[in-house]
């Protein structure tokens, strides 16, 4: 039986997590936390049955996105193809890892949308474009034209996404398009909060348990805006223009899909964000909020107050729970054979349309989900952006038992 997150993190190896503010730590301590955290991730990945595999490049897809980048992205960003090469490669790998069973058309839609979104997140836009990006959603709601080439490109991408994914089910086009749009709005807010946290999180604000109560829900709310999880979730179940899993077969899983996408991104981003001392993220904001509320730690720590270790334990619980809920939502209904499941794990192409024609929609949904699950995690581990080389190495090593420790409760 797999360890619970509490027992995973109870080892003395993770005592370095007993801190409250990453930003106040010196660099060696932050590096130690990042390194120990990869050990914890190995345990969590084992608990969900993760098997790390590197997926092959899709030559047709990469040719397609490079052509699009030359024709569109370079103009919209004012950067040449050489400067955009890492963004282009990262975006192509999104589709290669997330949607290995999908058609070129589904893959290119997701790769180009990802590339556009990544150019906002890399903080290299000129000031004029940054200012207009803040007005992007407002211009849509007011029926106003977008004023910069980047904003016009992004609007075209969202329009194409809505048309393709909403062709048969308008709900899907709407759901994903809203996610892409909200991301732009939230990104502008995130840039502001990176410079100055909200008043109720600010160290100069006089605290009380009453005034700080409003901080409890801010971190998950803010996290729900700053990603585009719904847009990625929609694409799982539409592998081609002609083939899609009926909405009612998976719509009930949307909240858990969004949780899965967000929390695994948070966890796999944590090492790189820790090393630079970033505080405007889900894990740091949650830790801050719980300390403001005088929450008690579940681990044996000096003072007994909530620490980063408790937040990571909660995040592990969310990651484990959302993954298991989704597995259980699809696997029993599909009655997947071990051979069929293995095909999903390895991203082996199969004729999904034949399964749909023969009434095996749940089996197709299970394989698409399983392939996405494995690919989503593998993409983060392989992507240079996340600096997870140490985790790659540890996943190649033989598993071993870590030192034991003690906690307060389970």
Image: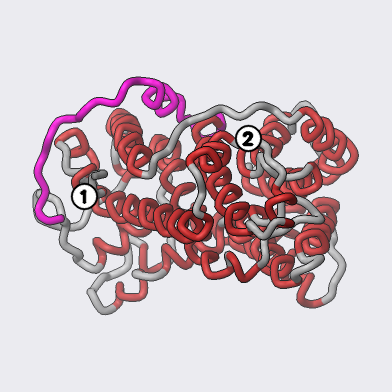
Q: Position of residue 84 (x, y in %)?
A: 74, 33
* Magenta-span inclusion, residue 403: yes
**Residue at which label 2 appears:** 348
Q: Is residue 319 above or below residue 111?
A: below
Q: Quadrant of the N terminus?
A: top left
Q: Are marks 2 and 1 in contact (CB under 8 Å)?
A: no
Q: Earlier in the sequence, mark 2 or mark 1?
A: 1
Image height check: is 125 above or below 64? below
Q: How is the image coloured?
A: secondary structure
Image location (x, y in percent) of residue 251? 58, 68
Q: Residue at x 40, y 37 (%)?
A: 271
- Disc 2 vs disc 1: which is toward the camera? 2
**Depth check, front residue: 98 or 229:** 98
Q: Position of residue 334 (x, y in %)?
A: 53, 56
Residue 113 appearing in the image: no
Distance in Å between CA atoms under marks 2 and 1: 35 Å
Specify few, some or many for label 2: CA neighbours under 10 Å numbering under 14, 14-19, or 20 or more: few
Q: How many marks?
A: 2
What residue lies at 70% left-to-right and 72% top-to-bottom? 171
Q: The C terminus appears in which quarter of the rendering?
A: bottom left
In the image as oriented, which residue stretches furthest toward the front? 358
The quarter holding residue 278 reads top left
238 lies left or right of 212:
right
Q: Which residues are magenta?
A: 383-410
Q: Nearer the viewer, residue 48 or 361?
A: 361
Looking at the rendered structure, the secondary structure element under dot 1 is: helix
Q: Which residue is mark 1?
A: 6
């Amino acid at each position: 039986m797999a360890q619970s997150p509490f027992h995973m993190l109870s080892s003395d190896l993770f005592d370095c997590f007993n801190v409250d503010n990453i930003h106040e730590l010196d660099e060696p301590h932050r590096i130690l936390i990042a390194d120990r955290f990869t050990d914890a991730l190995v345990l969590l990945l084992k608990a969900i049955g993760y098997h790390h595999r590197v997926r092959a490049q899709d030559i047709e897809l990469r040719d397609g996105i490079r052509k699009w980048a030359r024709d569109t992205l370079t103009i919209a960003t004012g950067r040449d193809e050489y400067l955009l090469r890492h963004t282009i490669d990262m975006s192509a790998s999104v589709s290669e890892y997330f949607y290995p069973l999908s058609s070129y058309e589904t893959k290119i839609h997701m790769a180009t949308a990802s590339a556009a979104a990544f150019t906002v997140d890399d903080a290299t836009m000129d000031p004029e474009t940054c200012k207009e990006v803040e007005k992007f959603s407002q211009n849509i709601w007011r029926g106003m034209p977008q004023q910069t080439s980047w904003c016009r490109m992004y609007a075209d991408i969202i329009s194409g996404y809505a048309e393709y994914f909403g062709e048969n089910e308008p709900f899907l086009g709407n759901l994903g398009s809203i996610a892409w749009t909200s991301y732009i709005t939230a990104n502008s807010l995130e840039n502001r909060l990176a410079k100055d946290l909200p008043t109720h999180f600010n160290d100069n604000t006089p605290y009380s348990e009453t005034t700080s109560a409003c901080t409890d829900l801010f971190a998950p709310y803010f996290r729900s805006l700053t990603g585009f999880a719904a847009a990625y979730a929609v694409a799982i179940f539409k592998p081609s223009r002609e083939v899609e899993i009926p909405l009612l077969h998976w719509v009930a899983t949307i909240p858990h899909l969004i949780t899965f996408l967000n929390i695994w991104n948070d966890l796999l981003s944590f090492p790189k964000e820790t090393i630079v001392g970033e505080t405007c993220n889900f894990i740091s904001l949650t830790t801050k909020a719980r300390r403001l509320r005088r929450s008690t730690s579940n681990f044996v720590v000096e003072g007994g107050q909530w620490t980063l270790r408790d937040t990571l334990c909660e995040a592990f619980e969310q990651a484990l729970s959302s993954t298991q809920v989704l597995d259980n939502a699809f696997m029993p209904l599909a009655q997947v054979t071990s051979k069929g499941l293995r095909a999903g794990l390895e991203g082996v192409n199969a004729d999904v349309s034949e399964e749909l024609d023969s009434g095996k929609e749940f089996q197709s949904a299970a394989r698409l989900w399983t392939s996405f699950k494995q690919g989503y995690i593998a993409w983060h581990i392989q992507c240079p952006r996340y600096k997870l080389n140490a985790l790659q190495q540890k996943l190649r090593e033989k598993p071993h038992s870590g030192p034991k420790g003690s906690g307060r409760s389970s």
